[in-house]
Amino acid sequence: MLFAGTSGWAYPSWKPGFYPHKWPAKRFLEHYSTRLNSVEVNYTFRTLPTPEQVAVWMAAVPPGFRFSFKAPEGITHRKRLRECGEAVAQFLASLEPVRSAGALGCVLFQLPPNFKADHARLEAFLSLPELKPAQRVAFEFRHESWFCRDTWSLLRAHNAAVCIAESEALVTPEMHTARHFACYRLRMPGGYDTAAIAEHAARFRHLSARREVFVYYKHEDEPTGPLAAEAMLVAAATALLAGSQSDMALAEPA
C-alpha cells in the first residue's frame, strides 16, 4: 500500500551512487525497479508515449510496480482544464496497457502557478466521462486560492486527491479528499536528512494502513531523490516488520 520513487529514472548522473558504474542507460528502469516500487513519468507532460515505449517500460519492471503519469501540458497549461475531453481521452488511451495490467498509479494534473481557483471549471473537468479510466486522479494546485473548503468538497465528491506537494515556493495543506489513495510530491531544495526521512516513513506507513500512498521525491543531478525514497521504504518496512513481530510475541501464550 506504500509506493515510493522519483519523478523519472533516466539520469546518467545517478551513477555510481544509485546505478552501477557500467550499467547501460537502456536498463536504468530495470535496476530502478529492483530498489523502488513506483515512478512518476514526467515524459507525458510534453509527449504521449508510443505503444512500443509503454511495452518496453512494462517489460522492465516486476509485478506490483506502479507507474504514475503527469498529464500533458495541453490539458493543464494551454486549455487549463477547459473543453479538453478529447485530449484527456487520447492521453488515457496511451496509458491503457498500463491500466489493464494493474500497474497504473496516479494520474497527476499539475496546474500552473498563475491558474487561480475556478471551481466551476474544476467541477466541469471532474465530470468528464473521458476521465473515468484514470482510476486515481490527483491535482497539484500551485496557487493558494485553491486551498479552501470548496476545492476540498469538489474533490471529495469525485473521489479525487489533493496532491500534497512541498517546495521552497509553496506547501500544500495536508488534506485527504480521495477515499482510497493519497499522493505526495516532495521537492524541498537540498533533499531530506535522515531525521526527515524517518518522519516520512512513520507518517506514510501509518497512512498506508488505510489507503494506497504514492510518494515521489524530486529528481536532481545527484541521486539524493532515489536514495531518500529507498531509505524511506526500508524504514517503513522495518517498522512494519517490528510491529508484526511484537504483536506475535504478545499473542503467544505465557
Image (cartoon, rainbow, N blue to C red):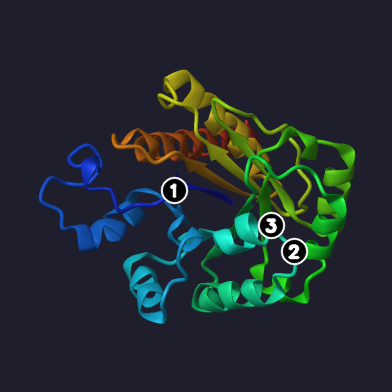
Q: CA distance from mark 1 to mark 2?
A: 26 Å
Horizontal relation, residue 228 to residue 1: left or right: left
Whether residue 140 is situated above or below residue 33 in the rendered picture: above
Going by the numbered disc 1, the residue's amino acid type is Ser
Going by the numbered disc 2, the residue's amino acid type is Arg
Which residue is nearer to you in this view: 248 or 200? Answer: 200
Residue beneath the point at 83% across and 64% down = 124
Mark 2 Cα within 10 Å, few/some/many (few <14, many 20+)?
few
In the rendered structure, find residue 153 and report the number of the disc placed on it: none
In the rendered structure, find residue 7 and report the number of the disc placed on it: 1
Going by the numbered disc 3, the residue's amino acid type is Arg
SS label for mark 3 = loop
Mark 1 Cα within 10 Å, few/some/many (few <14, many 20+)?
many
Tag 1 or tag 3, which sits nearer the N-term? Answer: 1
Asked if residue 109 can be seen in this view, the reply is: yes
SS label for mark 1 = loop
SS label for mark 2 = loop
In the rendered structure, find residue 82 and report the number of the disc placed on it: 2
For the residues bearing labels 1 and 2, Cβ distance under 8 angstroms: no
Horizontal relation, residue 115 to residue 4: left or right: right
Residue 158 percent across, percent down from the top left: 82, 60
Q: CA distance from mark 3 to mark 1?
A: 22 Å
* Quadrant position of residue 224: top left
Q: CA distance from mark 2 to mark 3?
A: 6 Å
